[in-house]
Amino acid sequence: MRRLTIADIAAAAGVSTGAVSYALNGRPGVSPATRERILRTARELGWRPSTAARALTGGRSGAIGLVVDRPAHVLGVEPFFMRLISGIEARLAEGSGTALLLQVAADPEGEMAAYTDWWAERRVDGVLLVDLRADDPRLPLVRRIGLPAVALGYPPADGGSGVPCVWDDEGAGIREAVGYLAALGHRRVARVAGPAVFAHTVRRDAAFTAAAAAFGVAAAPPVHTDYSGEEGARATRRLLAGADRPTAIVYDNDIMALASMGAAGEMGVDVPAELSLVAGDDSAICRLTRPALTALTRDVPEHGRLAASALLRLVAGEEVGHVPTPPPVLTPRASTAPAPGPR
Amino acid sequence: MRRLTIADIAAAAGVSTGAVSYALNGRPGVSPATRERILRTARELGWRPSTAARALTGGRSGAIGLVVDRPAHVLGVEPFFMRLISGIEARLAEGSGTALLLQVAADPEGEMAAYTDWWAERRVDGVLLVDLRADDPRLPLVRRIGLPAVALGYPPADGGSGVPCVWDDEGAGIREAVGYLAALGHRRVARVAGPAVFAHTVRRDAAFTAAAAAFGVAAAPPVHTDYSGEEGARATRRLLAGADRPTAIVYDNDIMALASMGAAGEMGVDVPAELSLVAGDDSAICRLTRPALTALTRDVPEHGRLAASALLRLVAGEEVGHVPTPPPVLTPRASTAPAPGPR
DNA sequence: CGTCGGTACTGAACCGCTTAACCGCCAACT
DNA sequence: AGTTGGCGGTTAAGCGGTTCAGTACCGACG
């Protein structure tokens, strides 16, 4: 059975293919009556446009791309991406007729290659950039090759080379967490962060140090990890084993906080009596573990949704500026408690 | 700057576009010398084929599709899909030049619609089907519309309508778990499963009941959930509150086991002293929590890899049969222990 | 030497859709 | 009445590849 083409529906409706095209795309040049007849036969025959033909005519490919660049062992447990994807999809499902192309890259080079290839092959109309870095090479790249892009993360100092950024004030979240811990009497707090190459890590680091100073608590230099539970637990062990053991630790994601709770338990350190823990993203994991994890709540799906929205507008030719979103807020649960008295 | 087309590289190499096409696709009809010259200029000019044009010629679209159909609140924490996707991508990255199209559907109808649309629009060359159901309507659908598909799950009784299945003997895993628990002295075991509509749930249910009988342990009827931590915890609470409280519970995924550990703790039931827990997938979560979760280890990424592999072969026109994979094996950790003595 | 066969390559049609250019027709206006 | 100008359509030229039918050339063979 052959594919249905506009020629078929043109024949069925007794008009030319040109008329069909105009009718289907809602452009002028066909009378309301003919338009209706064409649309009806198209619907009855179950016609769907060939994306290939559409794309070939210089139109859109009808897809946007997302490259996920994290080590495989992190990807499996990191709820962030699936939540982000849910949000993106939610927006795309709202009648945009746009699909999501996903690629898992092994390294930043692979990620860049994906963008170049996708764009050269006209597979996507635009891409979403996650995890902005300092002097992120992807920004000049997409600019140079003309690939529409929207980034998730704080806009870089130079404005982002015309790449709209969906961002929230991560500093505010960190400040709230540190302030809360200070109010609970904690005087030595630590931070276990993601990779230092990420711009948001650096920003949070700075916010953390500044907040600690402002609230008069001693802050160890942030420990950087690859976001994996293993590295999170190791960092926690080192912090707990060192002199000036912190009484509270703030994590950059949930998995590290979860893993660290186990590590603390093994070292005989009770959570929250002796150690308070704050998780980073507030995925469902925080609510499911015991003690439930206090967390910095960020609406990750909403970020995805907004980013997808911005990208669709950008692709459509609209001017799109940076998109600020509400800052993370602290959701206190059972993993934080007043600081222990002096031992 | 215009897009680079084969016409450009034809001009640069001093041949016709036809010759370029032959050379680039490694077909006969061009001399080795010319072929080399063409390939070189194409490389130097940085030419990449337009997927649209390729697809239009009746060729492949160069993409496969995956629809993920689980409630949003489950998707966020369920490691299964991200692990599966990692595996799929790993295979696709091996020089297939194939991309992955991802869609999150709200319900089975939305999933079916996605397949129909994708195929009608020739967006994908084939799809991967997850979570086979009893009398799964997707099987006749893909068959009817001629969409190449590979399913993940046990082949249905009717052979699967020509859809190759990548499967493992889940029953063996369940039997091993029940046997292990029986050997530890457990005499009352329960099972908290996924939705009963999934074929693999039913198969595991049956295996569970049979294994319990074989090992002489009392098995409560399996409790079915939506895979969410919340429902898993609720099921556990009910089991623990009922008469004939089980001393061991086997879960269908990791998140429910994790949530249940918390629920048990709240009820003052110690894991593993009073209650043994076996998780379902063995994602990293099992190793990260304390006590670490005993789990049925399944190589989910490998399943993805094999499924992608089978689909690529199918799309290429090869005959592809069902693909058996090693059965899940039990990985004992700290969440299982000898059954408590009679209270 | 003419013919045959094979190789290397060209030219053009075609895939399904968009769109600029054109065309016929009728109402309105001068 | 003749010109103008819309409206409602048609025609055909691409878009960037693939592929089939030729064609030019060359060595081999009878």
Image: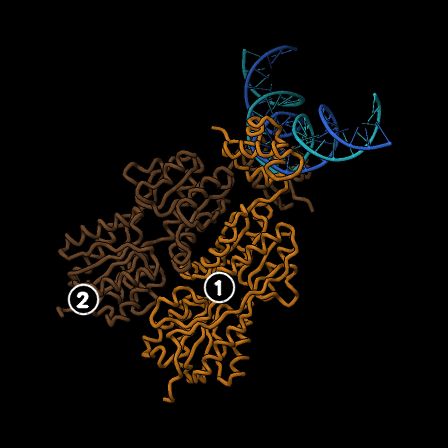
Chain colours: A brown, B orange, C cyan, D blue
Q: How many numbered discs sit on the rendered protein?
A: 2
Residue at 40% of width from left, 64% of height from top? B284
- Check chain identity for marks 2 and 1: say if they share one: no
Taking the view exactly as shown, the residue that stands out farthest to the bottom is B342
Q: Tell me which chain the residue with mark 1 is part of.
A: B
Which image quarter: residue A182?
bottom left
Residue at the image point whose x is 48% and y is 47% from the top:
A101
Taking depth in this image into account, of B14 and B198 the one nearest to the observer is: B14
Q: Are marks 2 and 1 in contact (CB under 8 Å)?
A: no
Q: Position of residue B299 (x, y in %)?
A: 48, 64
Secondary structure of residue under mark 2: loop
**Can you say whether A180 is above or below A155 in the image?**
below
Q: Which residue is mark 2?
A: A338
Question: Which one is closest to the eye, mark 2 or mark 1?
Answer: 1
- Foreground pick, A110 / B273: A110
User: Mark 2 falls within which chain?
Assistant: A
| Quarter the C terminus of chain B occupies | bottom left
Depth check, front residue: C28 or A14: A14
Q: Which residue is mark 1?
A: B299
Coordinates of residue A210 in the picture (x, y in percent): 18, 50
Query: Is any atom of residue A33 visible in this view?
Result: no
Q: Amino acid at mark 1?
A: Asp
Residue visible at 36% across and 81% down in the picture: B274
